[in-house]
Amino acid sequence: MVNSESWDWETGEKAIPTGPWNDKFRWVEEPYASPDGEKVSAIINLDESEFSVCVNGEQWENVFDKIWYLRFSPDGRLTALVSEMAEWTVAVDGIAWENKFGYAWDTVFSPDGKNIAASIQQDMQYCMALNGVTWENMFSNMTNTALSPDGKRTAATVQTGKFGEAEVHKFQEGAFTAAIDGISWDNNFVNVWNLAFSPDGKKLAAEVRTNLYDYTIAVDGVPWGKNFSCVWKPIFTPQGDKVVAPVRVDGKWTLAEDGNLIWNQKYVQLWHQMYSPDGKKLAAVVAPKYGRWTMTIDGNPWAVTFKDLVTDAVFSPNSNKLAAIAKDGELWKVAVDGSVWSNAFDMAWKPVFSPDSLNVAVKVEKNGKYTIAVNDKLWNKECEATWNPVFSPDSTKVLLRTIENGTYYRRIIPISDIS
């Protein structure tokens, strides 16, 4: 995680006009704000097949044939996928990687932002690139990419066996596996899906399909000793020595650890399991009955349920609270420890806890405008755009990044001004 203690938490307001950009350039795409709020950027078009990026009103020195997927890394560097002379690569703060490719997509970052990876295609072969360096081995197919927690290792589902459209028997024999840093597992499977690294980045787990009817989890290429009628994405325990995944047994879902069931409770659906920061609690999104969704902690579901979905769950830093957003009919709601906020929204984003775990802030949309809600209280400004709020390290202030009437604002306000 990026340390926000060095950010400016004293200046109350900084403003950067973005409206004039529309007069300065041929067109301007959607804006992106840096994590610390000091920069606002957008892809700009200068002329036919001439694109660049504008940051705080200043244009990148380099011009490219095409630019897309503009993203700030957690450490504040600005990245984009760029095309030069019909070749694609990643540009960081306007400087393109030395290596160029047939295509590049899906830029991902390590939590500290120091490592940047992307998916690569060259001559119809696929691999990953980490900080501009590609795997030595390439594959005919690649999906489900993953980056280790320290950002030093990359992995993906790859196809190692060849088969034609009509060669069903070869597909059933297994032609897919996982590759770490370009080195594939020895075992092949019918299918391989979502991957997960261990906390230390030394192990890799994945959903696998062993035949047309059976599914399980494989760790470093070795499947669990038990098969299930279906599985979802695995995660490692905080210690990194075991793997937990949702499994379907007798028509219902529960959690298994290294193939053994660990929850007695069974649900119509269960997925997106997650450990609390202290590693002592295990939560998941569940459907206790068909068409009703909620959260469960250690197998104990919230009393409240929602009609459409529950997502973006997050534990508080002290591990004592759990927040999530839910869609209930046409409205989005925020729930903390099973208590639903009185305010409902047209859209809501992932909740953010303050470092002291006492406050919850959420970016929300209402009546076509965006604002911030803190502890079920709405900020008094409606904006054309806003980004997720960030609490100060001492939990007394909140950083708000917004666009209002053609101007980007970076504001530091006391939490008490909203909550």
Image: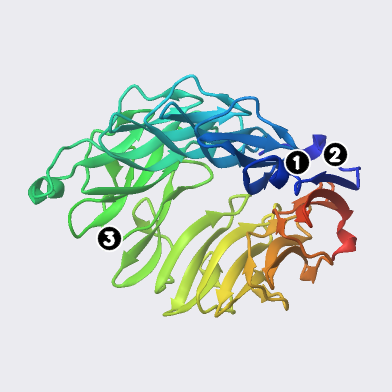
Percent position of residue 369, x then y? 71, 66
Q: CA distance from mark 2 to mark 3?
A: 52 Å
Q: Is 261 situated above or below 341?
A: above
Who is closer to the viewer here, 179 or 270? 179
Return the residue at label 3: 228
Kindly tell me whether residue 136 is visible in this rendering: yes
First-in-chain label (1 vs 3):
1
Q: Residue at x 85, y 64 (%)?
A: 418
Which quadrant holds the N terminus?
top right
Q: Residue at x 58, y 57 (%)?
A: 281
Q: Whole-percent x and y of residue 69?
A: 53, 42
Residue type indicated by callout 1: Asp
Q: Are marks 1 and 2 in contact (CB under 8 Å)?
A: yes
Image quarter for residue 255?
bottom left
Farthest residue, direction top: 98
Disc 2 marks a residue whose amino acid type is Asp
